[in-house]
Amino acid sequence: MNNIKELLGRRIKELRKHKGITQEKLAEIVNIDQRNLSNIECGITFPSKSLGAIADALDISLMDLFDFNHTNINQQMMKKFIQNSLDNLSEHDIKILYRLVKSMI
């Protein structure tokens, strides 16, 4: 099982990207070093002093930062995501994906 620092880091990164904020901009808003934010997103460090500021900058509650239920994706949901994503891939990417899947079977 993943540790809390890794899950929280991934969640912060996911929410930051969803908001369209760069790592540099979020670090600036929260008033921390970009390297520190990178370490948080990689699950290396825990944002104890900046946790509230990160939540505020992302316009979410602290509870939302710790909502990891979305990481429990079942096989049917994964297949549907893959099928829906195929339409957005270039022909080159589809060929790469085909070779990758074929090598796994």
Image (cartoon, rainbow, N blue to C red):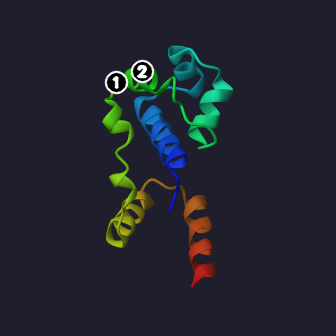
Work out how far the residue at label 2 is from the one at label 1, CA to CA, in angstroms: 5 Å
Quarter of the image with the C terminus is: bottom right
Disc 2 to disc 1: CB gap under 8 Å: yes
- Looking at the picture, how far across and down is residue 90, in whole percent? 54, 55
Which element type, helix, strand or loop, lies under badge 2?
Answer: helix
60 vs 44, nearest the viewer: 44
Q: Residue furthest bottom?
A: 105
Q: Quadrant of residue 23?
A: top right
Identify the element where label 1 is drawn. Answer: loop
**Residue underneath mark 1:** 59
Q: Position of residue 3 (x, y in %)?
A: 52, 53
Residue that carries the numbered disc 2 in the rendered image: 57
Residue 62: image quadrant is top left
* Identity of the residue drawn at 51% across and 17% down: 30
Residue 24, by quadrant, is top right
Figure label count: 2
Kind of residue at disc 1: Asp
Front-most of residues 80 and 33: 33
Of the pair 94 and 27, the residue shown nearer to us: 27
Q: Estimate the x, y position of residue 54 in percent, counting from the top left.
A: 45, 25
Residue 17 lies, in percent from the top left, at: 47, 35
Neighbor class of circle 2 (other Cα within 10 Å; few <14, some 14-19, many 20+) is some
Give whichever of 36, 79 is nearer the camera. Answer: 36
- Left or right of 39 on screen, residue 3: left
Looking at the image, residue 39 sits to the left or right of residue 30; the answer is right
Residue found farthest to the front: 48
Q: Is residue 4 above or below residue 73?
A: above
Badge number at residue 32 = none
| Residue found 57% across the figure and 67% down from its top | 97
Q: Amino acid at mark 2?
A: Ala
